[in-house]
Image (tube, rainbow, N blue to C red):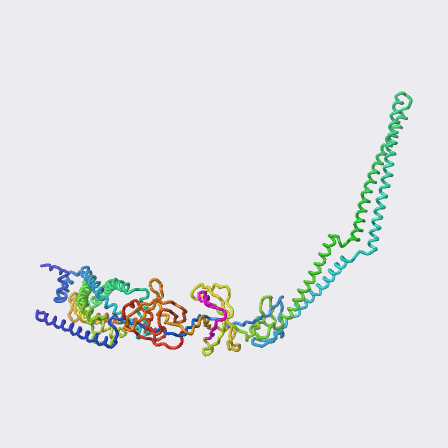
Amino acid sequence: MSKKQKIGVGIVIVCVFIIFVVIGWLNRTRVDNERNVPKNAVSVQVDTVKEDKIISKIKTKGIVEVREKEALYVNTPSTIKEVLVEVGDSVAKDQPLIVYDRKTMDDLEQQLKQAFIQLEIQELALKNLILPSTDTDIEKARLAVNQSEQGVQDALSNLKQAEMNHNQSQRALEEAKKEYKNNQVLFEQGALSKVEVEQSYEQLQVLEEKLEAAFIQVQGAQRLIENAKQQKKIAEKSLSDLLHKENSPNYQTQVQTQKKQVELQKLQIEHLQTQKEQYVQNTKSPISGTVLKMGAEKGTVVNPGVPIIEIGDLSKIYIKAEINELDSIDIKEGQKVKITNDALEQISYEGVVYKISPIATVKQGSMGVESVVQVEIDLNEVETILKPGYSVEAEIITKHQEKATVIPILALIKDKDGTPIVYVMKEDYSVEKREVKVGTYADLYVEVEGVIPGEKIIINPNTQVKEGGYVKPIEIKQSGDVQ
Amino acid sequence: MQVKKPMNLFQKIIKIFVAPNEVLQDIKESPRILIPFFYVFVITILTTILQKPMIELQQQEISYLSLERYGVDMLSLSGKGLTNNQSFWISLFSIPVGVWLGWLISSVILLMVSKILKGKSTYKQLLSLVIHTAMLTSTLVLIVTPIDLFLGRSSTVFSLAVLYPGGNMTSFVYNLLSVMTLFSIWAVIFQGMGLYILNEFSKKKGYITAIFLYIGKILFAAGAASMTFWMFDILYKQGIM
């Protein structure tokens, strides 16, 4: 390529570049004129600060439950002979619902009969125990005392006699001993024969044996006295017991024990009677309402603790809902609630918070483990098409203020130090950072102090929005209540 | 035989505009990578710093378009927690990395195409060609950036998008025209020349290959630029936004 050609190409290139610059310049001017906004302004969405009513709500899901609900149970395993109702049937209080096999009833009646007999026995025993002593018994006891007294006297006489015998034997023995000593002296002097000495010795031995026998007699008599005295004591005690029976501690204990036995037996009867009554009652509807659920069929054996038939009063339904622990602090009894159902779009009911559980429970939610507080909501309407078990949406109105300065929640941001601020757009499109005091939160709006109704605020400001900067506003349409 | 001395950087910077043939011959004989890379790196950083107001304008444009189109500020969604400065520094360091990756991939594609067309170039030559092409474009961009800044534009005035004044970033055609800058067209010509010199095949083959690759590149770039708005369009139509 020659130098001239190169210069030509260069000129063409420069010309092309100049043409682009000119076109670009013309376009830029036109675009800015069309937009009629400050140069280098940041595009932002703006909204107007309003004075409006603000309703703060907490949304939750709930289940329709029956307030008055009862179920039939059995106390002892029983076989169902017949079921008299079906699910959905309306029943009156005490209307028979079920018939059981007779066997359980027969068993109960048998047990009751036995318990009555047992009570009779116990009562007789008590009666016998507490009857006053008869004259005959006292006479007999006195006689026994007298006889024992006599026995003591006789024993004393016997002892006296035995002692006398013993003394005589002793004296006789002393004599015999002296005589034997004399006879020995005489025998040594030759005055007496050996046979005579031996005879006196034998006599001495006989007397010694006699003394021993007399001594045993004395001892026997003494024992007899002791026995007789013992007998007398027993007889006297028996008499005393008969005469002063009520004061005896043993007697009191016996009576008390027997009374308790009677009481126990009565309780047993009472229990059996209650069982019998309950058994009869368990066949009847405990309340007026509708049969909600059947837990057993004809011919099946039902066990205690298993609900057989559930009856509920459908005119008294309520909503059971769970509120996150963070929201629960705003919930108060009596707060209004709007109840809706996804399937019944056109229908909504009103209710009030009736009861708030005093404790929170931990449950596994979609966001992990969370603590929830159970809330009961009463429906204002009695006639509803809601049925127990329906899932509903509940909007609990925690705060309702007729006049408040509100801004869209997206306009409220936090400064670096965490202070709540909003960016206010002035008439010349410049931006002012304004500190605000935050009040009630609604779904999309928040009540604030620090801005004036009518002022323009920037929604969801991006990082290019700065105090003193300029913005291009894009206003959004608003309508309806602030909720 | 006389051995030709390789060109130095300053010679290359001048000759790439006035005598590209000589630069390409130099690449063929001694394909340099590092020095041109550092040059491009420094120039790109410098250009990015200079273009900071343009980047801000671009972000404002995105905010405006997204607010007008969807009622949502795309920038406030994507840039949560990032300040302007943070975004700028992130882009400052991510751009060179991205550019390097782009060069490596482009070189591989060029090598594949060259081999299919039975060219004689090596990977190193082609990578050097790609980097020298970047040298050309980055220098041009640096030269014209003050003009763009003076005009207060969010994108360069030297793209075909200037011929489509009603367009904006939400349009694929506009994005396609935006990436078709005068520098990129210049670069295609340079690359076409480079391909036929390095591969030793006809001029026609070299230019056609360069043009085809360019078409692929601009379609990809325009698609990527439009992608965010396409995704937002889908979300908006489905009522998610």
Instruction: Where is residue B162? Give x, y as percent.
Output: 21, 74
> Residue lying farthest right?
A191
Q: In terms of depth relative to the viewer, which is nearer, A134 or A306?
A: A134
Quadrant containing the C terminus of chain A is bottom left
Q: In terms of depth relative to the viewer, which is nearer, B65 or B115?
A: B65
In the rendered image, residue B194 lying in the magenta stretch gets the answer: no
Instruction: Where is residue A205? Give x, y as percent.
Output: 86, 31
Q: In terms of depth relative to the viewer, which is nearer, A154 or B138?
A: A154
> Residue lying farthest bottom?
A346
Quadrant containing the N terminus of chain A is bottom left
- Provide the residue span drawn in magenta: A323-341
* Location of residue A13 (image quadrant): bottom left
In the rendered image, residue A330 lying in the magenta stretch gets the answer: yes
- The reply, left or right, for residue A397 in relation to residue A68 is left
Residue beneath the point at 70% across and 61% down: A265
* Location of residue A476 (image quadrant): bottom left
